[in-house]
Image: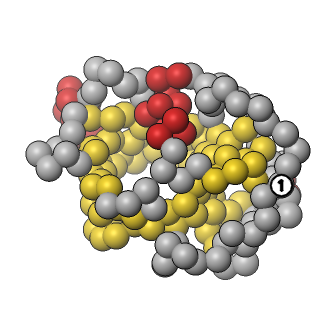
Amino acid sequence: MMSEGLEIERKFLVKKPDLSRLDLKRTLSIIQTYLSNGENGSQRRVRRIAENGRVSYTFTEKVYITPVTRQENEFEITEEKYNELLSQRRTDSVPIVKVRYCFLYMDQLFELDTYPFSDKLAVLELELDDPEQKIYFPGDVSVLREITGDRRYSNAALANAGMFPDEPVGDRQIGDF
């Protein structure tokens, strides 16, 4: 697997939904480790991904253009290369552990990231063709607010804090975006 190009993505804080009510396509157990930044200030990371008894490893390098858009290069690596790259991990960041549930709704592929430190909240991501693209959320997912570009909800910040940022979480539902 190799992907290069522009990534357009929006992220939302959601109440952790009942997974049995979603059209789940994949379930991935991910350990994500941030590496020292690249030469051009790019963010670099490696992932160990377990799915259906198979383990794979990826390397990703991103350059942020806007909060919604970034240049991304991602490719699969060997376990040996993964272990070698771990020596470049950032000392100011701990790895993030998460389970990602991928599901379809109205021809949109959503990724729901859940974390061991919260049984109430999760992060919902959607890659888009256009930053202004309308998003349709399933009725079974309660969106609390958009967190695109909010660094407090980055995987690195969540890993270091071991919790979601301290804020009131009500029953309010944000409409379609």
Residue 121: image location, x then y, percent: 72, 38
Residue at image coords 70%, 30%: 167
Residue 68: image location, x then y, percent: 45, 61
Instruction: Answer with the quarter of the image where residue 43 lies.
Output: top left
Residue 115: image location, x then y, percent: 62, 34
- Is the residue 151 above or below the residue 143 in the image? above
Residue at image coords 43%, 56%: 67
Residue 153: image location, x then y, percent: 54, 39
Q: Could you classify mark 1 by the number of other residues whose Cα lies within 10 Å: few (under 14), some (14-19), or many (20 or more)?
A: few
- Is the residue 36 above or below the residue 94 in the image? below
- Is the residue 16 above or below the residue 66 in the image? above
Q: Residue 111: tell me if it is visible.
A: yes
The disc labelled 1 sits on which kind of residue?
A: Gln
Residue at image coords 37%, 25%: 93
Q: Nearer the viewer, residue 35 or 57?
A: 35
Taking the image as shown, residue 96 lies to the left or right of residue 147, namely left
The residue wearing badge 1 is 173
Quadrant location, the N terminus: bottom left
Label 1, secondary structure: give it: loop
Taking the image as shown, residue 148 lies to the left or right of residue 112, namely left
Instruction: Answer with the quarter of the image where residue 105 lies.
Output: bottom right
Quadrant location, the C terminus: bottom right
Q: Residue 97: tell me if it is visible.
A: no
Residue at image coords 49%, 63%: 9
Taking the image as shown, residue 135 lies to the left or right of residue 63, namely right
